Image (tube, grey):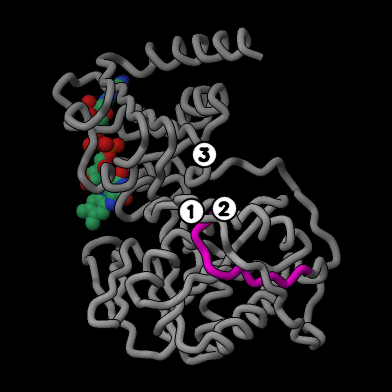
């Protein structure tokens, strides 16, 4: 493996944050391999997204600007395969997301590549690439080395840095595969206002066992998250109790987040929770125990009953935002 290709997911004309992280990781790993860093972007908005990607430290951005490819997996896999086969043995980085895993696994099947899912670190030693990933619900952390010519790493969101770079990438067009696909997108209907996911939100308000039941997640925490324009997260204890769905879990066996502000409500701060949120720019904990472990790494520990503090905070944030609107 010599070159690294980041597959770029996008929505509403913007690249997903994990794809920008893939672009950053592509540069780092390509430099370690002595190769080049590439991105592949497919869809009706691909040309505009390539313009945005130019701010990232890539050598080449490969573009298939075709609105007929929107919402489909096969054209993306075709485009990725065309670019990868032209470049020769390469590592492909996709987001560890539904689309990323779908595209990555189909590409891997086509070129007989090894695949590492949920990679939290990528290492290069003696020209061999390995990925670190938690397995068995986080009970073991594995390091797997690629033995294949091509490899796919599905990277965990919010772990790799999305650092803008030189901005000198070349933009080149991908030759369309020129084949008819078995499915076409008929209609794209948003059935509900899309909720901001915890991985993308700049403010995450998480709740733990201290909240005592499911209701505060849809009232107390939701009110605070909405006041900030953020998202609701949770500790594993709250998820295991069935108070909120797994998609909200933060931590070793949940999601990793890196928001500007993380508010932990009724969460003790176990190491398995900490690893999923420790890179937040500011961490505020609300806990009735002044000795809760989270106090050791939070920027601010507010000691008291969440049910008294959070409603006041909601009012204060709403008032502050009303003044600034
Ligand atoms: C392999 C493995 C993987 C794991 N993965 C994860 C993971 O991904 N994410 C994760 O979160 N955990 C994970 N865990 C579990 C982790 O070890 C902890 O058990 C869990 O994080 C505890 O959740 P908690 O902080 O909500 O609950 P607790 O530790 O019970 O803490 C509850 C806190 O609420 C406070 N409190 C109680 N009432 C109030 C109130 N009225 N107002 C304010 N504060 C109050 C208490 O003082 C206490 O600090 C994992 C464990 C293992 C073994």
**N-terminal of the two: label 3 or label 1?**
1
- Residue bearing mark 3: 201
Q: Position of residue 182 (x, y in %)?
A: 78, 83
CB contact under 8 Å: marks 1 and 2: yes
Using a 10 Å C-alpha cutoff, classify the residue at mark 2 as few (fewer than 14 neighbours), some (14 to 19) or many (20 or more): some
Name the element at disc 1: loop
Question: What residue sits right under mark 1 in the picture?
Answer: 165
Q: Tag 3's secondary structure?
A: loop
| 317 in the magenta segment | no
Q: Is residue 30 visible?
A: yes
| Magenta-tinted stretch | 56-65
Query: Where is residue 234 shown, x and y percent of the image?
Result: 39, 39
Q: Is residue 25 above or below residue 52?
A: below
| Left or right, residue 66 beside residue 222 | right
Judging from the image, what secondary structure is the residue with disc 2 in? loop
Where, quadrant-wise, is the C terminus in this rendering? top right
Residue farthest to the right, as pictured: 186
Q: CA distance from mark 2 to mark 3?
A: 22 Å
Closer to the chain start, of discs 2 and 3, is 2
Neighbour tally class for label 3: few under 14, some 14-19, many 20 plus, Cα within 10 Å: many
Q: Which residue corresponds to the image point at 30% horizontal and 62% vertical from the top-left?
A: 137
Instruction: Report x, y in % for residue 324.
Output: 61, 12
Q: Which residue is mark 2?
A: 55
Distance Cα–Cα, label 1 vs label 2: 6 Å
Q: Nearer the viewer, residue 99 or 287?
A: 99
């Amino acid at each position: 493996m010599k070159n690294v290709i980041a597959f770029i997911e996008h929505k509403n004309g913007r690249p997903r944050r994990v794809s920008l992280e893939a672009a950053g990781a592509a540069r780092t790993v390509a430099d370690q391999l002595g190769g080049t860093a590439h991105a592949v972007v497919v869809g009706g908005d691909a040309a505009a997204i390539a313009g945005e990607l130019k701010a990232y430290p890539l050598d080449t951005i490969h573009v298939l600007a075709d609105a007929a490819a929107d919402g489909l997996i096969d054209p993306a896999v075709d485009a990725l395969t065309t670019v990868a086969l032209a470049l020769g043995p390469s590592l492909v980085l996709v987001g560890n997301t539904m689309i990323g895993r779908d595209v990555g696994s189909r590409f891997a099947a086509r070129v007989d590549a090894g695949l590492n899912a949920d990679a939290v670190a990528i290492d290069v030693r003696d020209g061999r690439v390995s990925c670190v990933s938690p397995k068995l619900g986080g009970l073991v952390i594995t390091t797997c080395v690629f033995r294949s010519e091509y490899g796919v790493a599905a990277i965990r969101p919010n772990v790799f840095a999305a650092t803008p770079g030189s901005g000198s990438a070349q933009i080149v067009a991908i030759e369309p595969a020129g084949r008819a696909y078995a499915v076409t997108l008929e209609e794209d209907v948003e059935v509900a206002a899309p909720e901001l996911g915890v991985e993308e939100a700049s403010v995450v308000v998480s709740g733990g066992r201290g909240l005592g039941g499911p209701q505060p997640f849809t009232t107390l925490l939701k009110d605070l998250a909405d006041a900030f324009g953020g998202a609701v997260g949770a500790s594993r204890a709250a998820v295991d109790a069935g108070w909120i769905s797994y998609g909200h879990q933060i931590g070793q066996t949940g999601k990793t987040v890196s928001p500007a502000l993380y508010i932990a409500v009724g969460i003790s701060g176990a190491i398995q929770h900490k690893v999923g949120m420790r890179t937040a720019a500011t961490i505020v904990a609300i806990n009735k125990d002044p000795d809760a472990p989270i106090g050791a790494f939070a920027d601010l520990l507010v000691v008291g009953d969440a049910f008294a503090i959070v409603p006041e905070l909601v009012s204060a944030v709403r008032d502050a935002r009303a003044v600034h609107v």
